[in-house]
Amino acid sequence: MVSSCLLIFCLPFAKAGAETFTWMAIFLWIFKRVLGYRAKGCYGIFPETELNKALVIFIAFNIVSVLFSVNLALSMRGFLGKTLKFIGIYFVVVEVINNNNRLRGLLISIIASVVLIIIDAGFQYFKGVDFLRGYVWMPLRASFSTRNGFSAWLIVIIFLLLGLLISKRNISVNRNINRALKSLLLILVVLSVLCLLATFVRGAWFAFLIAILLTVSFIFRKISLKNKLIYLSIGLSLLLIFLILPQPIKSKITTIGRINFKTSGTINARIKSTVSVTEPGVNIRLKLWKEAARIIKDYTFFGCGLNTYSIVAKRYRSFEGGGIYPHNSYLQMVAETGLFGLCAFLWVLLVFFNTGIRYLNKKEDYLVLGLLSSILAFLIHAFFDNHLYSLQLVVLFWFILGLTVAIIRIDQKELA
């Protein structure tokens, strides 16, 4: 439990710490088995969850990709040091977070981590450099090495905090402390959204917008069509105002407060450049995706092997600056593990969302809804970047998957 809390706390700002606590959590989990502790499913080795069968298939096709790899040693390291580790995180979280007291402890760790990172982001915004890692503004990225990584972490955190904010769950057993924490959550949500805007990452904006629309639609699914149209009109009106007025509002605030608001361009400019194939970021991505498509054509079904994209892509380099990761997690997954590997991963996701939605149809739990939305937003954003292959972000992904399933199991246990 302690290792899991420390893992999620230091994940945004300390890769070495996250790696250490990840392996510590997995080692302690294995050590418990050696001492005789047994779970209820899978011969007492793994906790019994609805994702288990899908995960077995996913692991199987990863093994197949290793056997067909262009570099067996590199793929074996990727399978043992990455794939099994990440799935291990999922099972550790599912097993460790087995009651509401432990859940509250973990949520407090997450909130504490968010507070630290938001303060760090604010320091970077106004001072030009963050105090945790010494990273400079480029634009806002806090303690992450890239703004894309920061924005991916933010969209997960925003939905988690939103779900916790509107949930009936108590973060603390003390009413006064719980009310204070709810107020803090509201502040953190607002500041996190502002940070997301300040990253100027269009893929994250798009993912956030799609996920929030689907989440709101799910919340209001039982209301009348008339009310849905009213809420939709209000939302679109606010969005239109926001898109039209950011620069004048920002100028007025700058004049009144004499604060130097640093940006690398307006929000409008970033949105307009998204649909332009001549815009550098878009153009490079399209070229990298074409390179990935050529690799997939040559290694269609079983892939070129886990953990080998970086060496294989060099042979398919088609332009100056090419031959690197494709900035698309799914293209990279197909290239490395083949179509079978991607289908297995999509099956895991299908089972996960099916489990979550069936649970929500039985019980109104906004924390679980927030976690489902966070995973959805993350997966949409992953279409535009390599988040499923970034240490911090892929650990976060499997951690949240495990946390969601753990919460569902806790509630099902209490109802039984």
Image (tube, rainbow, N blue to C red):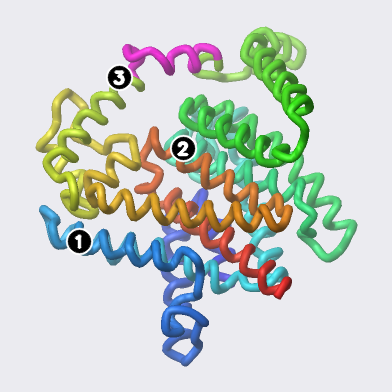
| Residue stretch in magenta | 268-280
Looking at the picture, how far across and down is residue 398, in whole percent? Answer: 47, 57
Q: Earlier in the sequence, mark 3 or mark 2?
A: 3
Which residue is drawn at the image coordinates 58% and 49% (left, top)?
372
Q: Which mark is residue 388?
A: none
Q: Is residue 123 above or below residue 268?
A: below
Q: Is residue 311 above or below residue 33?
A: above
Looking at the picture, how far across and down is residue 59, in whole percent? Answer: 31, 64
Q: CA distance from mark 1 to mark 2?
A: 27 Å
Of 109 and 337, nearer the camera is 337
Q: Which residue is mark 1?
A: 64
Which residue is drawn at the image coordinates 54% and 19% (left, top)?
263
Q: Is residue 192 left or right of residue 382?
A: right
Q: Which residue is mark 3?
A: 283
Of 335 and 223, nearer the camera is 223
Q: Which residue is mark 2?
A: 380
Looking at the picture, how far across and down is residue 308, in whole percent? Answer: 19, 50
Q: CA distance from mark 3 to mark 1?
A: 34 Å
The nearer-to-camera label among 3 and 2 is 2
Q: Farthest bottom residue?
A: 36
The answer to if 177 sits in the magenta stretch is no
* Residue type (three-letter) at the residue carrying disc 3: Asn
The nearer-to-camera label among 3 and 1 is 1
* Residue type (three-letter) at the residue carrying disc 1: Val
Mark 1 in CB contact with mark 2 (< 8 angstroms): no
Which residue is drawn at the image coordinates 46% and 29% (left, top)?
203
Mark 3 in CB contact with mark 2 (< 8 angstroms): no
Looking at the rendered structure, the secondary structure element under dot 1 is helix
